[in-house]
Image: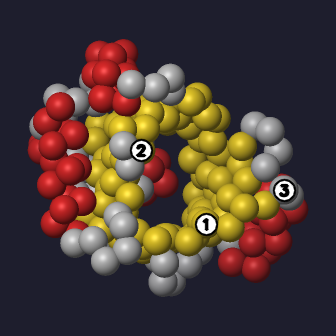
Amino acid sequence: MARNVEIKARVASLDAIEPLAAALSGQEPVSIAQDDTFFACANGRLKLRAFADGTGELIFYRRSDETGPKESFYVISRTDTPDTLREALTLAYGTAGRVRKQRLLFMAGRTRIHLDRVEGLGEFLELEVVLRDGETLEAGMEEARSLMAALGVAPEQLLSGAYVDLLGRAP
């Protein structure tokens, strides 16, 4: 399984972070509308991500729900029929929630910087430092901490869990 180091943080303003992310990236960002359906899954999380162009990705991942940088293991399978796949998985497993967001993706070396506007929740920053085979977890965590500092993200802004968990707790 592929793995990365992730952080998720609630931010006051994506507009304030965007120029910092752009400077770290040195590339134009990619804007992505994402519609994630989560399914009941005893061994981690299983979600179907549908894109506006009619394609999608089935993503299984496993990570702890602690705050701070954490290791995530994942497998991604692409699909050209996300609606049919969503129906089949819903019938088989039941849904655990749905998350719709507008994501601005910046690449800073091997790290994906996500600036997310999540329906019903607000604005967030995610970092995903992709680890190479055999690379230590600590190397990825150090890179995540360095990028957090460069983007002005304080440790107290970090969140545990996933957006679907936050939506489940929203009033």
Between the C-alphas of marks 2 and 1, the distance is 16 Å
> Callout 1: helix, strand or loop?
strand
Residue ID at (68%, 58%): 57
Scheme of image coloration: secondary structure
Q: Name the residue under label 2.
A: 112
Residue 29 lies, with reference to residue 139, above or below; the image says above
Residue 31 appears left or right of 115: right
Q: Mark 3 points at which residue?
A: 80
The C terminus sits in image quarter: top left
Residue 143 lies, with reference to residue 123, above or below; the image says below
Query: Which dot, 3 or 2, sits closer to the camera?
Result: 2
Q: Can residue 119 be seen in this view?
A: no
Q: Name the residue under label 1.
A: 76
Q: Quadrant of residue 14?
A: top left
Check disc 2: other Cα within 10 Å, few if <14, some if 14-19, many if 20+.
some
Residue ID at (22%, 72%): 136
